Amino acid sequence: MTRRLLWFAPLVALAALATVPWLASPALIQFGITTLLLATLAQAWNIIGGFAGYASFGNSVFYGLGGYGTAIAMVQLHLPFGVGLALGAALAVVFALLLGLPVLRLRGHYFAIATLALAEAMTGIVANLDIAGRNIGLVLPLLKGDALFYELSLGLLALVTLTVFWISRSRFGFGLIAIREDEDAAAVMGVNTTLYKAAAFTLAGFFSALAGGIHTYWITFLDPISAFDITLNVMMIIMAIFGGAGSIFGPLIGALLLASISEVLSTEVTNLASLFFGLVIVVAVIFMPRGLADVMRRFKRLGWRYFSQNVRENRL
Amino acid sequence: MALLLQILVNGVLLGGLYALMALGLALVWGVLNIVNLAHGAFIMLGAYVSFYLFTLLQVDPFAALPLCMLSLFCFGYLLQRHVLNLIVRAPMFNTLLLTFGLDVVLMYLAQIVFSADFRVVNPSYAGANFSVAGATIPLVRAVAFAVALTLTLAVWLVLVHTRLGRAVRACAQNLVAARLYGVEPRTVYALTFGLGAALAGAAGDLYGVVSQISPYIGDALTAKSFAISIIGGLENPLGVVIGGLFLGILESLTSLYVGPTYTDVASFGVLVLVLILRPKGLLGRAA
């Protein structure tokens, strides 16, 4: 009986979240859209970073490409929003395959740095493209409909979470986890590591691009610096790790908690908000390095010793 | 031709400073296996130390160099000893995240304490220059270049020839073996990180002389230091000199022949290429 209830819980939560636009204030709906999109990005990062263990700093490139695909289609080519989203997603998929294949050969820090460099280079390239509005950016037509953007974001989040759920119990997911734990051993066991990594990178890119497209149309403006912002990428990573990378609901909980903390802080203590956010990261990394999901699993048994044990495990 | 010569000179002078910026990052990365995302923020702090010494106490920025280094050394030593040593054995993600958190904290602390205004360190000789073979050389940049290269060389000599240097290199190669030979890694790690921070402080001091300071300069400097460390490779401390000069000249040439907006594309494009083709750096042995 409880098992069946557990299955229903996400559906009930989804249904409850879907009613928010009819009940909540405009400010709360806007906070909801931002949080849902951040959760989508964190969940998409979870595929490549959490499951495959590749610390991608290039997911903001996908996000930016999704935004630019949408903006270029709508502003320069006068196509509908749906086509723009598809174009953005297609750009991200092509990018993931073309650059993912060479870059995914790198491991550890080197992969992280290479993806970081790709994001920096993309900012520079897009700032020089006429069709993308150079470094001034593009202004999209205004669509007043926060409820629509909210439901779209919620749908996208449900889709990416469903995908992660599928990954977590599929052969593909086990392959990714094997790559994370020991890539050479995974290859020996017959996992096609190149294909698996490229697929994970592409999936992450696909969902990030859709999130970027929705966000761009929602705020109706896009410029190179905000589109490929590294800070956004770091936010995804922090949210995923804070909640528990490699789990299904960890990134969602992490995104919700951290977005709420930063929202409360920025209304209460405007100029201290980012400072506190930095401190939260530092404290969380030291005391709960495996995220909330792990805290929930083991805190009951270990109590407060859980935190000191974490420190003891990782200190010099 | 004269223009090309001038551009090359500019690139080389810039490159020397770049090398010093990257040296601290490369040292900490190579020895502690920590990619310090707050490295640029340390450079920023060093620049502010120099700025306040200059404006409040009229200390010449070049004379302030040892003070900048000392203050950042203490800061880095304490940080490693009491914070970073707690997570040294954690997975790579965690060290990246922790230093990113530090970067955010330092940046916004600086914004609150120093304000977001752009600052310049402007000694009386700031505009002076001399010319060699038709190329104009700004005096402060030339001195900054010389100081940067001297410091880089000094660090290299310390690493190769002193007992401390050998202990540091031993920790980088094999922590367990180093411990067995009586090296205390907690202290060596803190000293190394302190030295990395001191180098960032020196770079910040020189940066303040040749450019503008604000709390937000850190991230771009971290990214540049990365690029230089990768291009030069982590195996040899002199790699950063090659990487720094390479990047300085590349940026100068790009801004002349392609356009100033393409400098980041060029430098990060080269970085990706180097990573893919020669992951151990230009000087490193091929993988």
Image (spheres, grey):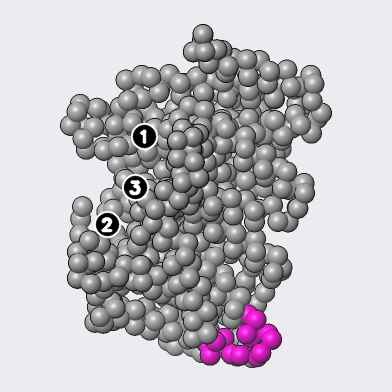
Q: What percent of the width, then of the height, locates residue B237? A: 31, 71
Q: Is residue B190 positioned above or below B123 on the image? A: above
**Residue B52 forms part of the magenta stretch:** yes
Residue A217 in sight: no
Q: Is residue A188 positioned above or below A236 on the image? A: above
Q: Nearer the viewer, residue B232 or B59?
A: B59
Q: Residue beneath label 3, please?
A: A108
Q: What percent of the width, then of the height, locates residue B129? A: 54, 88
Give the magenta-colored segment's residue range.
Answer: B51-65
Q: Tell if the residue under mark 1 belongs to the same chain as the one under mark 2.
A: no
Q: Residue beneath label 1, please?
A: A52
Please report the residue visible at 60 percent of the width from the left and 59 percent of the height from the top.
Answer: B105
- Amino acid carrying mark 1 in the image: Ala
Q: Residue furthest left?
A: A188
Mark nearer the viewer, 1 or 2: 1
Instruction: Report helix, strand or loop for mark 3.
Output: helix
Instruction: Report helix, strand or loop for mark 1.
Output: loop
Please report the residue visible at 63 percent of the width from the left and 25 percent of the height from the top.
Answer: A153
- Amino acid carrying mark 3 in the image: Gly
Which mark, by number, is residue B280? Answer: 2
Q: Chain letter for mark 2, please.
A: B
Q: Residues within 10 Å of mark 1 (few under 14, many from 20)?
A: many
Q: Nearer the viewer, residue B85 or A199?
A: B85
- Amino acid carrying mark 2 in the image: Lys
Instruction: Report helix, strand or loop for mark 2.
Output: loop
